[in-house]
Image: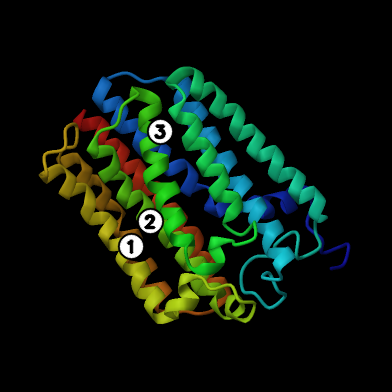
Amino acid sequence: MSVSSRPSPIQIWLLAARPRTLPAGVAPVLVGTALAWAERDSLRVGAFIAALLGAVFIQVGANLSNDYSDARRGADTEDRLGPVRVTAGGLVPPRQVLTATYVSFALAVLCGVYLIIVAGWVILAIGAASILAGVLYTGGPRPYGYEGLGDVFVFLFFGLVAVTGSYYAQVEHLEWEAFALAVPVGLIASAILAVNNIRDAPTDARVGKRTLAVRLGRSAARTLYALEIYVAFLIPPIVWLAGGEHVGPWVLLTWLALPLAVPLVRTVRQHDDGPTLNGALAKTGMLQLVFCVLLSAGLLITG
């Protein structure tokens, strides 16, 4: 890469942080907090801010850890279709990426310390498990992201754990509605990863990274993406009809996001080229954010 074409330091670290994935960290905190606010009719502002920042720092830390680990394992080759990875692309020395990973997780821990003070030691287990899962996704001796389990991790930690953890930080107990409403959040978060893995399936297969898209094949992975998106829209009304307390018909506001979802599913089904799928990945992240903002609004109106 020539000096003239080299990105600026800010651009490089933005590449490393992967801002297109950050809605996956922000969105579940909004839903969990909104449900809790609707229940108790008050908000722990500090806990909300700490949970939001903690989720972002964990997401960035996981992205940096994956950038570092994938480069070491040879997964980020020159012919991959996605954006340049800073370690494999020689934009940042590996040690600096690793240091940035530690800094990001340390900032997440500081947010967690505040949440422990406010809501108790349950938050410690949630935060520790989230950080460990982020590191072991592509790091460690047996990274589960290389065995097709990344989608399960995303569903659990960017859906169930993030929503229920944010809810617990506000009210210090758990109700079934928090788990139920975490399902659509986790499904769309998994769809973000699915686009990434559909795009990278050919290069991942060559280096032995057996993501779900590699294991199932691109066609089946596209079908799974469509199911994750559409089932997500069915869950909120089901929770309402099942008698969820503080969950009313206003959760149907989420259906206002369907005009964003339908073209996205069509795009992922019909295209293989990197730029188009990169755009679909970013738009799936925005779809999750829009969906969760609408769901949160519906919960607050009902509450």
**As drawn, 132 above or below 169:** below
**Residue 233 visible (yes or no):** yes
For mark 2, what is the residue? 188
Q: Indicate which disc, 1 or 3, sits on the residue closer to the N terminus.
A: 3
Q: Is disc 2 in contact with disc 1, using a CB cutoff of under 8 Å?
A: yes
* Lateral position of residue 119 relative to residue 255, left or right: right
Which mark's residue is nearer the viewer, 3 or 2? 3
Q: Amino acid at mark 3?
A: Ser
Q: Indicate which disc, 2 or 1, sits on the residue closer to the N terminus.
A: 2
User: Outermost residue toward the front?
Assistant: 141
Question: Where does residue 33 sit, x and y in percent of width and height?
Answer: 36, 31
- Residue lying at 72% horizontally and 64% vertically, measured from the top left: 71
Would you call the spot at circle 1 few (<14 residues within 10 Å), some (14-19), or many (20 or more)? Answer: many
Q: Indicate which disc, 3 or 2, sits on the residue closer to the N terminus.
A: 3
Q: What number of labels is visible?
A: 3
**Residue 298 visible (yes or no):** no
For mark 3, what is the residue? 166
For mark 1, what is the residue? 228
Depth check, front residue: 172 or 244: 172
- Residue lying at 64% horizontally and 60% vertically, measured from the top left: 141
- Which SS class for mark 1? helix
Depth check, front residue: 183 or 135: 135
Question: Where does residue 163 sit, x and y in percent of width and height?
Answer: 37, 39
Residue 121: assigned label: none
Could you tell me how far apart the alpha carbons at marks 2 and 1 are, in whole angstroms?
Answer: 6 Å
* Lateral position of residue 37 relative to residue 157, left or right: left
- Which SS class for mark 2? helix
Q: Amino acid at mark 1?
A: Glu
- Which SS class for mark 3? helix
